[in-house]
Image: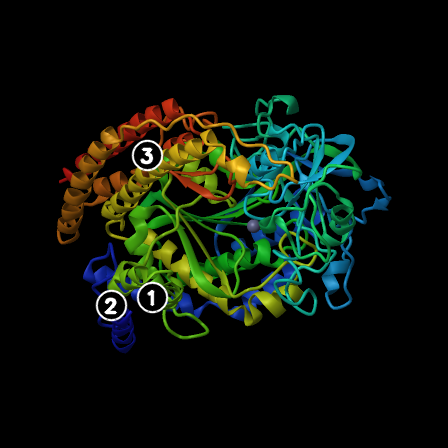
Amino acid sequence: MKKLFLFFIAFNAMIANAQTDSLIGFTATSSKNEISTEQKFDANLSAENIGRNIKTLSLKPHNLGSAADKENAEYILKLYKSFGWDAKIETFKVLFPTPKTRVLEMTEPTSYKALLKEPALKEDSTSAEDGQLPTYNAFSADGDVTAELVFVNYGLPSDYEQLAKMGIDVKGKIVIAKYGRSWRGIKPKVAQEHGAIGCIIYSDPKDDGYYQGDVYPEGAFKNEYGVQRGSVMDMVIYPGDPLTPGIGATEDAKRLTQSEATNLIKIPVLPISYHDAAPLLQALDGPVAPADWRGALPFTYHVGPGKTKVHLQLAFNWNMVECNDVIATIKGSQLPDEWVVRGNHYDAWVNGAADPISGQASMLEEAKSIGNLVKNGWQPKRTLVYCSWDGEEPGLLGSTEWLETHIAELQQKAVIYINSDGNGRGFLGAGGSHALENFVQQVAEDVTDPQTKTSVYNRLMASEVVNASTNKAKQEILDGHGWKLDALGSGSDFSSFLQHAGLTTLDFGYGGEDDGGEYHSIYDSYYDFTHFKDPGFKYGVTLSQTAGRTVLRMADADILPFDFRNLYKTINSYVKELMEMAQQMKENTEMENKLLAQNDYTLAADPAKTFVAPKPKDEVPYLDFSPLQNAMDAFKKAADSLAIVWKNQMSSSANHDQLNELLYRSEQQLLTQTGLPRRGWYRHNIYAPGFYTGYGVKTLPGIREAIEQRNWAEAQQQIIVTADVVNHFATYLSQAASTK
Ligand SMILES: [Zn+2]
């Protein structure tokens, strides 16, 4: 920490000198120019202007397909043009269901009809706007079901294992699950796999409500009526328009029928508030819920099933709607066929001041400031492409359809895709391609935290060192090994760029000090944002500085700032993790089977309660990781020699075009043609959203998920697949290292 702090003082004292020869990927002269460009870029960023755009763009509810959403697209288009960008709207046709009928009622033992409504609040003027989408889960199935109710905790596979031990089966039942611990779409999917015929998801006050802090509008947390809308499309199969997987949803695209789409849930799903959930949960009988299942409602939680029956009736308008992406470009002066792509969505579930308008307003501020640089004679070396995406909320529709339409050109030309989404007060969150780890660290060292005036890097490291759980971990951070890019799963528009097309990707956002329960509710408003998320819009500017610097440096770098030694270290840590995980599973399985054979679980259980001992598990065989370990050795050698070549080229005046192209097209070498098992749209072999976590990432997903699912043959086969990918990648890097 001390070292970092000294670096910061030195940086501040000698901003014009000490830094000039040190931007990664820049010669001393071009580095000096770049820093001067960045100072001009910063000078044109305005918190007030970001605030104005947040207010304007979040004034009306503007979900995909609404008139207000189209108005926002036109407004954004006009802004880009006024900044001097070449801008246009690119329109796709996508499937987007909105609710026609929503009924949820308890029919036995007493009756209760759910309100399914968030009330307007006098404090929050936009909460009373017309045009709000009702509370619902997009891509729920139509359905009219009545059945006994079962409480399934968070609705994860492990919760159903627990239910099985309690002798409870959800077949033919309706389940009620808490929001949290997984992406929401996983809950109905797992319920459906277990034979449930309907799924209700609610926000428990323990996770998202009064247990956390004061509720809205006095505080930021969810009040009793707040509901989290959201998509339950099975995005881990493929995101984007369900009817056009793998191709752009243009007017004349060849479409699947709805029943052919493999990412649509088959049972009705509805999100509700804790006000509506309480009577249902309170009426449940059956066993008392396990201790770690219980929430913060004022009664004893039971699991059911029993006398409690509910009726769930949902019907939707399955409309085809326009999805309008706003695409703005500034042509590069020297390398027009190398593109730096930047994106953030603008569609919201309702007003969406935080999600996504805060990020959109920061991105527009970057575009304004870059436009200003161009008006004053500066030009980027590479082409800039700024994308304001539509239709992110229902399932990454706008970004995925654009990517799928232009994939060939993007794989040829895109140097990087830089994403953001909602933004708030607090710490830098940064994820993406690990070959850019050093580069992003340097960007973070050069951006000042608006609250503490240290760099956002120092602030993040301070938080990490304080919160690290062991002294060993703390010491590692103090020794300068704390900075890590997060691996990306899903949940925002980067997904198709990284996981389908294999483009180098980064994702940025600030947060952690922006309390809130407003997510996807009518209370994600300008009032909420200015009181609880980023008062004064200071972190709006910080995000512009972070993403903007990344854009400018990638656009102007003499040699692109890739360092594959970081990628090697990261992947190697994943390999070790998987080897340990397999070993741990082996030991756990042996022990559990032994205890089962001795009848210990049954003897330890309370005989007055139902206990069904689980079946013994199949033994875990030794997996042979050696092909992958050998491939990793080859990777290390290639990454080391490329790093030397990279450094030598930095000090030579030779043309770097060939090396640059090899560098930025490297990520594509990590794809496989066939993709992941049972979900071929996901072709990246290193990062994917988890099949049973959703947004949460699974690294080395082919191997990891096979082990988790105890599919040993597939695990062994995926080790070979991954070893082939890594060997291919090593060969590719060696070729790049032979560039003259
Ligand atoms: Zn968003």
Q: Quadrant of residue 37?
A: bottom left
Q: CA distance from mark 1 to mark 2?
A: 10 Å
Residue that appears at 64% across and 41% down: 152
Q: Earlier in the sequence, mark 1 or mark 2?
A: 2
Determine which of the numbered discs, if any, sits on residue 700 in the image. Answer: none
Q: Helix or strand or loop: what does disc 3 sit on?
A: helix
| Camera-nearest residue between 358 and 706 | 706
* Quadrant housing the N terminus: bottom left
Q: Helix or strand or loop: what does disc 2 sit on?
A: loop
Mark in front: 1 vs 3: 3
Amino acid type at circle 2 is Gln
Mark 2 sits on what residue?
19
Please rate how many residues cluster around mark 1, counting C-alpha atoms within 10 Å: few if below 14, some from 14 to 19, many from 20.
many
Q: Is residue 328 left or right of residue 107?
A: left
Q: Quadrant of residue 736?
A: top left
Q: Are marks 3 and 2 in contact (CB under 8 Å)?
A: no
* Quadrant housing the C terminus: top left
Q: Are marks 1 and 2 in contact (CB under 8 Å)?
A: yes
Please rate how many residues cluster around mark 2, counting C-alpha atoms within 10 Å: few if below 14, some from 14 to 19, many from 20.
some
Mark in front: 3 vs 2: 3
Q: CA distance from mark 1 to mark 3?
A: 31 Å
Mark 1 sits on what residue?
446
Residue that appears at 75% across and 43% down: 285
**Is residue 99 something that shows in the picture?**
yes
Q: Are marks 1 and 3 in contact (CB under 8 Å)?
A: no
Q: How is the image coloured?
A: rainbow
Residue 539 horizontal/vertical position (percent)? 49, 66
Residue 433 horizontal/vertical position (percent)? 35, 46
Mark 3 sits on what residue?
670
Amino acid type at circle 3 is Leu
Q: Is residue 547 left or right of residue 611?
A: left
